[in-house]
Amino acid sequence: MSITALDFRDIRCLQAVEWKPSPEMNLIVGANGAGKTSLLEGISLAGTGKTLRSGRVRAAIAHGREKLSARLGFGEGLDAGKLCYERGASEKTWVLDGVPVKSAAEVYGRLPLMIFSPESHYAMLQDPNARREVVYWLMFHVEPFFLDAWRRYQRLLRQRNAALRVRDRNYRAFDPGLIQLSSVLADMWQRAAQALEGPFRDIVHQQRLGGEAATVLRPGWQGESLAAALETNRETDERLGYTFAGPHRADVAFKLDGRAIQEVASHGQQKIFMSAWRLAVVMVVVASGKRPILLLDDLAAELDVERRESFFATLKDVGLQTFVTAIDETSFPAPATVFHVEHGCLRGP
């Protein structure tokens, strides 16, 4: 899968950009504030409905404009499609092939995007929700029944929590369903962990991280089963008014030489680790037969020349359509189609 055409209007400093990218490696070069990240943000808006930065989407509307729009065409033949995302001050529209999008999953299934950015790296280290999202993204693309199981689990979880909040003792009636679905989701989680081991180990070895890297995927409860955890946490759940244990609390721990990576690794090592893990996730999805599109914002920062060359060589070998931002071409070691952006204007090779 690749993006064939892009049309952005009034996204931050971008007033009007029409763009036909390469189906392989695209390098976007420009000074700070020129609009490099805004170009990636346009792709993110059309493909996920989200920005690359913190804050609300409407903050991405160019100053003095009423709305932004991000349109893109993707795929070929029977797989071809068109996306349009528009956002005004108080309303938005998101359309796939002329039909309003009812669920983001409709778009995610057609156009898989993996985003590498400074914000995503730091979020992965600090926020368990960000870590879960990456594993959910993997399971969504490789486990045919994940979305249905996850939606059913979330529905039961909301009902149980609603009963807990009003001190309704009948909340226990939801436990059997939660336990059954938790077992299904935990099996998927475990398969994801096993599938990631080989690709992650290989990428880290290539990157010469300087220690033994490992990840530990936690199912969301302590002990042998969720049934036992629910019983153990019953008083806690009743006091807090929500369900403390379950797949919604699953997490990933990142280790370097057996210690939390935040405690022992430099910023550069942390970036290498997180980038390697995300790329391993992508490679598992590729092995399932899908072709994600990669957005890499300022990945070269904090990486030395050797590790930049190694990482981008691995990216090149994977052979996916990739969009990369950089201050100049010299910081990017792999062959690419180069686009220059200046004051919100894009010019091609």
Image (cartoon, rainbow, N blue to C red):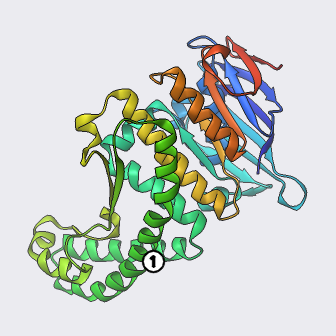
Residue 140 appears anywhere in the view:
yes
Residue 97 vertical position relative to residue 40 in the rendered view, above or below: below
Residue 103 appears anywhere in the view:
no
Residue 345 % position (x, y): 74, 16
Could you say which is closer to the camera, residue 313 or residue 1?
Answer: 313
Dot 1: few (<14), some (14–19), or many (≥20) neighbours within 10 Å?
Answer: some
- Give the quadrant of the C terminus: top right
Residue at the spot x=38%, y=43% of the render?
124
Residue 33 % position (x, y): 57, 14
Q: Is residue 302 left or right of residue 199?
A: left
Residue 192 vertical position relative to residue 31 in the rendered view, above or below: below
Residue at the spot x=36%, y=54% of the render?
215
Instruction: Kindly indicate the quadrant of the structure image that contains residue 115.
Output: top right
Residue furthest right as drawn? 77
What kind of residue is marked 1?
A: Arg
Count of all numbered marks drawn on residues in the image: 1
Q: Pointer 1: what residue?
A: 152
Residue 176 % position (x, y): 31, 89
Q: Is residue 299 left or right of residue 228?
A: right
Could you say which is closer to the camera, residue 211 or residue 252?
Answer: 211
Residue 14 % position (x, y): 68, 21
Residue 99 vertical position relative to residue 169 in the rendered view, above or below: above
Could you say which is closer to the camera, residue 344 or residue 22?
Answer: 22
The secondary structure type at the circle numbered 1 is helix
Residue at the spot x=60%, y=61% of the render?
105
Could you say which is closer to the camera, residue 173 or residue 331?
Answer: 331
Q: Is residue 117 left or right of residue 347?
A: left
